Image (cartoon, helix red, strand yellow):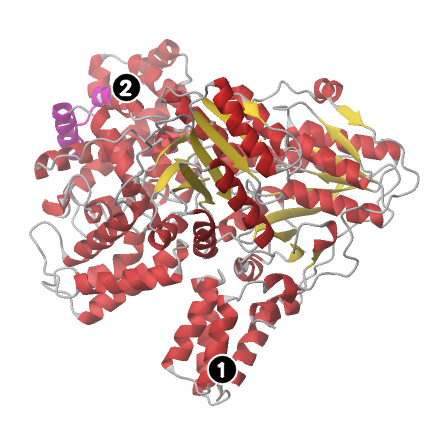
Amino acid sequence: MNAQTILLILLGVALVFGLGVVLLNRRSGAHHRPTAPPVPRAVDEPNAAPPPAVPSTREQTAVATVAVEPEPEPEPEPEPDAEPVTRPSFRERMARTATAMAGVFGGVRARGGITADTWDDLEEALLKADVGVGVTDALLDGLRSRVKAKEIETADALLAALQSDMSSRLAGADRTLHLETVPDGHVNVWLFVGVNGVGKTTTIGKVAAQQAALGRTVVLAAGDTFRAAAAEQLGTWAERSGAELVRGNEGGDPSAVIFDGVQRAAAKGADLVLGDTAGRLQNKSNLMDELRKVRRVAGREPGVVSEVLLVIDATTGQNGLAQAREFAEAAGVTGVVLSKLDGSAKGGIVFAIETELGIPVKLVGLGETIADLVDFDPDEFVAALFGG
Amino acid sequence: MFDNLSNRFDGIFKRIRGKGRLTEADVDEVLKEIRTALLEADVNVGVVRNLVARIREGAIGIESSKALDPSQQVIKLVNQELTNILGGETLKITYASRPPTVVLMAGLQGSGKTTNSAKLARWFKSQGRHPLLVGADLQRPAAVEQLRTLGRQIDVPVFSEPGDPVSTATRGLAEARRLGKDVLIVDTAGRLAIDDEMMAQIRQISDQITPNYTFLVIDAMTGQDAVTVAEAFHATLQIDGVILSKLDGDARGGAALSVKEVIGRPIAFASTGEKLDAFDQFHPDRMASRILGMGDVLTLIEQAEKAFEKDQAEEAAAKLLEGEFTLDDFLEQMQSLKKMGPLGGLLGMMPGMPKELKNAQIGDDDLKPVEAIIRSMTREERRKPEIINGSRRQRIAAGSGRSIAEVNRLVKQFSEMQKMMKRMGAAAPGKKGKKGKMAGLAGLGALGGGGLPGLGGPGGGPAGGPGGGFPGFPPSR
């Protein structure tokens, strides 16, 4: 559909609509309620928010880019944050509050038999965990038919079956973080994407520290050139992990910063570039286009993009699915990082993301410290939802 | 995206339509859809349960009135119910008799406290106040730096000092008094509602600075947890109002409804974009239709009313439907349309627009070639484009600086549009919209059908006219 056709259709539509409104109101004689000041969103231009485009040939921006070399740190210092040596458990972190879900399941168990209330309770528990109507219906429909067929007869068996169904929905996905074997002079790139405020920068900081602890040389590219002081925030993490930070100017071209990060990493023979990007809402198509470009440029020689990780806040509701869909389409997301799962939110939206879009959850944030960012374990996750 | 609730209702409503009275079974069916829509909008399960119960009471026994069929009345009922919850008393800011008026910002990590602190400061400034921002988020690296940068952008001073958030806040208050500032906004670190230590800390801050307003910042994308969070913060701090952030996303924002219902405090402000001026007081009426997935129809209606002259519009509409709409009229109405704001924005607000149209990036600049071409035509040509022959075409192209092909395309598309509008004018119900590229319009069926009328907002129940107020859009899909 070419632009002009769209335009004409739109014009026609808008005309009809505009005219219709006026006429309808005249006809009904209804008076409009006192006009409140228009919501800014209504007049917000679609391109209201873009970081000012920088006249960026790569050369230009490259000049503006500063490679911040941390003081040479021959001995990796013991990480001050990393005092918990043992991996935190999902159950411990996810069940700090008396979970509504576990309570409901307790009630179901206590009832013994399977009644209409049982189904209502289960439905409510799943919905409360943000599992969503679609997945909830699918899960419960499956169980209903098994109950009807007398395969399941007690509440305990029903809960066990639900737990195993939920686990199996998340089974079989490849959840490893990939580092490809690249020819000399090339470097692996992991990009971090997501909407505003999900914890991208913090996640990168933690991943950097973990990868550095594994003996890898890491370069951080501060691709969030939009949010004030985002690069400073990443810089703090670079210091903590002994990684090098490559940053550009605030408001500069993010692709250029990522590209410079890749160049820098390749030049010093680093193992991995972690690329930060500005938070963006997935319905801002200009910002999603910018992300497409970042993804493209990151994969240019000598960069090899081996992971594009979408960070999703565990408190996110059903919009998480739209986030995953749009980011996957724009940037080829390879995995999800579910952040802030140590709060009271349960992150149930990952069921829909995994089953409908086939994007595996790879990492989970279970707390503030570096060691609290852990590999996602679906069985443990589901068990924690059930309260043990 | 906004999948139009009234589209989802199509099937059910077709059967119900024409019935004088809804049976209990009809109501159940409709309520099930409403329940799903609310849940998909992230309205809390418990809140949905209560809501649906209330709507059921109102819906059973609904009789069709002159203007609305029962199905539309149900939507209207739902919309009213939502507006009631969201609305009620709005927050009126009253300033402390002994300045400064102290505002405390609280919320989870990443909800947007720092950005919204700055936006709020800018808002106070626009009200003629002199705010001071205090950066008491000493947790997140560079959070204070972020606040300082934002403060510079809006020309509002920022106070902060390393060390302890409680004493920073207290010192900030003293600083505001010293500087004679009349509003103090304290940004705090994000914290989990279940983190006792951090909750105790913000409680301490609150005790020290005794805020006049404590705002809870909530992300519009929040799911079911919004209720837990709001309850916990409310229990600790006595929240006065909610700031709903990231409302410019495509989340339906059911969290707003849940929070309002559960803590009974109004949504005071909403943040609607990344720019610092994209922030305003909250309009509950629009939020209701958004949660229901009906687009921002109310805003659109308002804009349309402002932009289109009544008499002219009436005439144009009549012409349009009779197929006598000329390129001159088109040009004229196009100008009105431009007054409604950027086209891309309009498109996004239209309910039931197909996705490819919604996502199309159309700027006002795209109108220019069209305008140029029409303006290069003689009056006669604008009235009867069919007389445009080879040499006329060449002249028009040369005059407008566009190619002949473009002129051709415009003329052809205009006539297609004209035909279609004419058909709409005469459309019998059930007639299929033209396939292919024009199918987009068919989606608008909702406007003439269930969508607009159901809103029960301005324009009351305009479904009066034969086949909908704006007659006979072909049904969608």
A245 left or right, relative to B450: right
Please give the range of residues in magenta. B310-332
In this orientation, which residue lies closer to the viewer: B233 or B366?
B233
Task: For mark 2, name the chain.
Answer: B
Magenta span includes B43 = no
A320 left or right, relative to A298: left
In this orientation, which residue lies closer to the viewer: B134 or B207?
B207
Tag 1–tag 2 contact (CB < 8 Å): no
In the rendering, which numbered label is found on residue B227? none
B386 left or right, relative to A169: left
Q: Which residue is mark 1?
A: A109
Callout 1 secondary element: helix
Q: Which residue is mark 2?
A: B388
Magenta portion: prevailing SS class? helix
A60 left or right, relative to B275: right
Callout 2 secondary element: loop
Whether residue B175 is visible, yes or no, is yes
Whether residue B274 is visible, yes or no, is no
Task: For mark 1, name the chain.
Answer: A
Where's the C terminus of chain A, which quadrant? bottom right
- Across and down, in percent, residue A328 comes to 58, 47
- Classify 10 Å Cα crowding around label 1: few (below 14), some (14-19), many (20 and above): some
